[in-house]
Image (cartoon, rainbow, N blue to C red):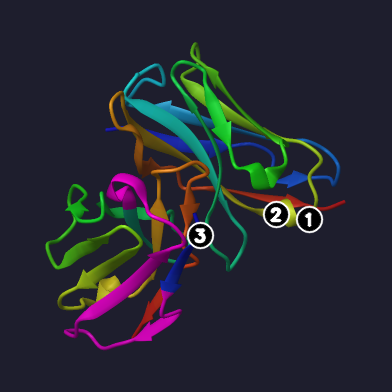
Amino acid sequence: IVLTQSPGTLSLSPGERATLSCRASQTVSGTNLAWYQQKPGQAPRLLLYTASNRAAGIPDRFSGSGSGTDFALTISRLEPEDFAVYYCHQYGSSPMTFGQGTRLEI
Amino acid sequence: QVQLQESGPGLVKPSQTLSLTCNVSGGSITSGSHYWSWIRQPAGKGLEWIGRIYASGNSDYNPSLKSRASVSLDRAKNQFSLMMSSVTAADTAVYYCARGHYDILIGPYYMDVWGKGATVTVSS
């Protein structure tokens, strides 16, 4: 399954709302889609799984939605530490695949 | 709290075999509730899943690697390993190991714990 993320880069300011999109080339079974955040020099950090469930310790400003082939990650009010690269990832079919990433910049 | 740590040579010659180990602490690789994965990321690029192994020893791989990758478990050391044969410069990347959840009814689930990554360069 090919995951296409848009936009490639999103330029926003702290306090604003961010919406990141992930479109799959075919249905993601069981809404088995996760979102990761990655900062330079660090491993990806799990934010959401099953499209909308927050991982442990993730602030509630992060939310996810979608099913089938269209998914979204929303950050309600951007904090300075939220500027990073975000990847969607489907784990419902093998091979597991990742989107190409959206860079969220100030 | 489970932690993963990759180790292995940082430099591999072209056509040789890349070998990495992931040490798991704070949890057991024999847990039937988890699987153990390898993912890589070339510099400045996105993430590519390589393969995974379950506690049962069953494994599956990304077909894009054309059967060059193999993941194995060392239950005595609580480690799992990646071997990738016939490497080229295109295999230069940061390699991550990660833990995924497994549900007997749902199947493989999301990956939640990652190692910090090991940089591997393929060059003569």
Between A92 and A76, the residue placed more toward the observer is: A92
Image x and y of residue B112, in percent: 33, 43
Taking the magenta stretch, the answer to whether it contains residue B71 is no
Q: Position of residue A90 (x, y in %)?
A: 40, 51
Identify the secondary structure beneath mark 1. Answer: helix
Amino acid type indicated by mark 3: Val
Mark 3 nearby-residue class (10 Å; few <14, some 14–19, many ≥20): some
Q: Residue at x 83, y 45 (%)?
A: B13
What distance separates the C-alpha of mark 1 from that of mark 3? 24 Å
Image point (22%, 71%), residue name: A74
Magenta stretch, residue numbers:
A6-33
Asked if badges 1 and 2 are on one and the same chain, I answer: yes
Callout 2: 10 Å neighbours few (<14), some, many (20+)? many
Name the disc covering residue B120, or none: none
Residue B35 in the image, given as x and y percentages of width and height: 42, 29
> In which quadrant is the N terminus of chain B drawn?
top left
Residue type indicated by callout 2: Thr
Q: Residue furthest top?
A: B76
Q: Amino acid at mark 1?
A: Ala
Residue located beneath label 3 in the image: A2
User: Do residues under tags 1 and 2 come within 8 Å of each other at their CB atoms?
Assistant: yes
Residue drawn where x is 64% and y is 42% of the image: B63
Q: Chain under label 1?
A: B
Q: Secondary structure at mark 2?
A: loop
Q: From this viewpoint, is residue A80 visible?
A: yes
Does B20 sit above or below residue A44?
above
Q: Chain of mark 2?
A: B
Q: Which mark is residue B89?
A: 1
What residue would you read off at disc 2? Answer: B92
